[in-house]
Image (tube, grey):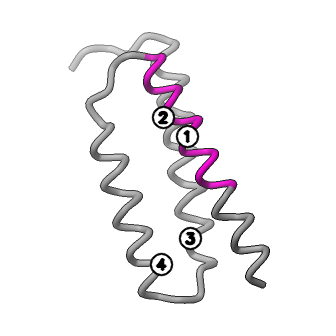
Amino acid sequence: MKQLSLKHFIVRSQVLALYRDIMRTMMKIDDQDYRKEMREWTRSEFNRNRTLRDLGEIRTQVALGRRNLNELKLSMQMAS
């Protein structure tokens, strides 16, 4: 296995932190069917982007994921 550069290692830790944050947030969704659907969609998106190697593209996807997570949190706050 190829060793990760320091930059890749840092970005990888950001990706994993984002994934965990998304999963934690989704546990707060009351509707179990919707929660399951969101969990499956999240996993498929992370798996789809698993092969990315370009740091710029990975950072773009992380930023998009954070934006989507913030929108999810906002909509959950508005619903309660």
Q: Residue at x 43, y 22 (%)?
A: 57
Q: Are marks 4 and 3 in contact (CB under 8 Å)?
A: yes
As drawn, 10 above or below 76: above
Give the residue at x 45% y 27%.
Answer: 58
The amino acid type, in three-letter code, at marker 4 is: Arg
Q: As rendered, which of 11 and 79 lies closer to the eye?
A: 79
Q: Are marks 1 and 2 in contact (CB under 8 Å)?
A: yes
Which range is magenta?
55-70
Q: Which residue is mark 3?
A: 26
Q: Quadrant of the C terminus?
A: bottom right
Looking at the rendered structure, the kind of residue marked 2 is: Gln
| Among the 4 quarters of the image, the one containing residue 2 | top left
Query: Which residue is label 4 attached to?
Result: 35
Q: Say what amino acid the circle numbered 1 marks.
A: Leu
Decide: is 5 above or below 11: above
Per the model, the C-alpha gap separating discs 3 and 2 is 19 Å
Query: How far is mark 1 from mark 2, CA to CA?
Result: 5 Å
Q: Is residue 13 left or right of residue 44?
A: right
